[in-house]
Image (spheres, helix red, strand yellow):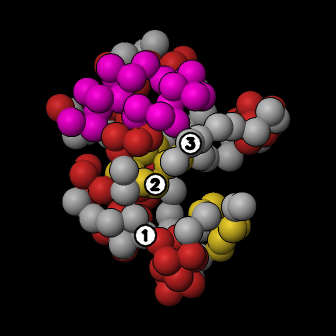
């Protein structure tokens, strides 16, 4: 399925960053994220993402410590939680705990999940009791 970004997506991401709102990715398909979505955004060195997901399963904060330039590349997303690294499917409580650890947030804090798939996004979020924005 083809992917594209809305023309104002970078303005939105800059707005989010300006107000220090944490933004992350939760996905069941790290390859699609790595090979399709990141090149469209053009904001992450794909080799570093590959290294992070497949070779060095450590937190992004630790990577920032070792690679001060990594933060400049990894501009908008503070964490990536994928099914391989978290050993869980999207919106499984284990996946959210993994995202919480890497993203540095608490699940009892106010947070929003944006999803587009009824079975994979909306139903699990209703079960977890989180806030949801359905994208179209």
**Residue 103 horizontal side relative to residue 118, left or right:** left
Q: Earlier in the sequence, mark 1 or mark 3?
A: 3
Residue at the image point whose x is 49% and y is 77% from the top: 119
Residue range corresponding to the magenta coloring: 34-54
Residue position marked by numbered label 2 in the rendering? 26
Residue position marked by numbered label 1 in the rendering? 91
Residue at the image point whose x is 69% and y is 37% from the top: 5
* Residue 38 drawn in magenta: yes
Q: Residue furthest top?
A: 69
Residue 93 spot, x, y in % from top left: 36, 73
| Circle 3 residues within 10 Å: few <14, some 14–19, many ≥20 | few
Residue position marked by numbered label 3 in the rendering? 2
Q: Nearer the viewer, residue 119 or 62?
A: 119
Q: Is residue 18 visible?
A: no
* Residue 67 drawn in magenta: no
Q: CA distance from mark 1 to mark 2?
A: 8 Å
Q: CA distance from mark 1 to mark 3?
A: 23 Å
The residue mark sitting in front, 1 or 3, is 3
């Amino acid at each position: 399925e083809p992917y594209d970004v809305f023309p104002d997506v970078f303005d939105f991401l800059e707005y989010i960053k300006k107000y220090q709102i944490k933004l992350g990715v939760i996905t069941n398909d790290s390859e699609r994220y790595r090979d399709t979505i990141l090149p469209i955004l053009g904001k992450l060195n794909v080799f570093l993402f590959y290294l992070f997901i497949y070779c060095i399963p450590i937190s992004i904060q630790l990577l920032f410590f070792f690679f001060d330039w990594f933060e400049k590349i990894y501009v908008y997303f503070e964490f990536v939680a994928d099914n391989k690294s978290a050993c869980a499917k999207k919106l499984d409580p284990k996946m959210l705990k993994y995202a919480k650890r890497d993203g540095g947030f608490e699940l009892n804090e106010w947070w929003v999940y944006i999803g587009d798939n009824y079975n994979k996004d909306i139903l699990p979020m209703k079960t977890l009791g989180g806030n949801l924005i359905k994208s179209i």
